[in-house]
Amino acid sequence: MTLDVFNLIDPMIQSTPEGGVTLVTQSEGGYTGPGGTWEPGTETETTLGLVTTQQASMRTAQLMADLGGVANPSDLRVVYINDGTMLYPDDDGTFAQILRFSDGNKVRDWRVREADNRPWRYYCKAIVERYRGDG
């Protein structure tokens, strides 16, 4: 029997935000037809079941600032997923995976900055940052 954390996160911690957590994945767009008309990719939304979100600590914010860029502690969250969903950091700026959940005020989009994936335990811990859009 292997050790896993399946069914331990949500029943024990109970901190899924109101409205749940949705994973938004963006498929690749491309040029189609004669003349190369651009067709944007489509969004697919998946509601995640066993998730908990927590405010990032000051230590986590310092770690993100040390890795490059500016980290505002109020814009960072730590997300624990225990249903087998794996997240990957948005290193190239394509925003292929966005989480959508409430920060207590309204539902916002969050991009993945760091991720610790352990598929053999159905576990993913991700540090996410509030996405403020293109402007």
Image (cartoon, grey):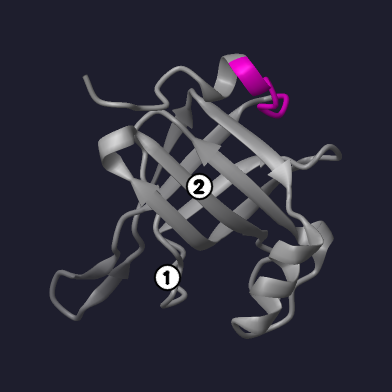
Quadrant where the image shows the C terminus: bottom right
Q: Which residue is rendered at x = 62% and y = 27% of the image?
A: 20
Q: Which of 131 and 134 is in front in this view?
A: 131
72 to the left or right of 20 = right
Q: Which of 129 and 14 is in front in this view?
A: 14
The structure residue drawn at horizontal position 21% and vertical position 78%, both measured from the top left corner, is 36
Q: Is mark 1 on a helix, strand or loop?
A: loop
Write down the quadrant of residue 21 in the picture: top right
Q: What residue type is labelled 1?
A: Thr
- Pinpoint residue 38: horizontal percent, then vertical percent: 30, 72
Q: What stretch is highlighted in magenta?
A: 12-18
Q: Which of marks 1 and 2 is in front?
A: 2
Quick one: label 2, few (<14), some, or many (20+) residues within 10 Å? Answer: many
In the rendered structure, find residue 56 and report the number of the disc placed on it: none
Query: Quarter of the image containing the N terminus?
Result: top left
Give residue 72's position: percent from left, percent from top: 80, 69
The secondary element bearing badge 2 is classed as strand
Q: Is residue 72 above or below residue 85?
A: below
Amino acid at the residue labelled 2 = Lys
- Please give the residue where the numbered disc 1 appears in the rendered image: 94
Which residue is identified by label 2?
A: 125
Q: Looking at the magenta stretch, what is its main secondary structure? A: loop
Instruction: Give above or below for 94 relative to 15.
Output: below
Q: In this view, does 18 lie to the left or right of 29?
A: right
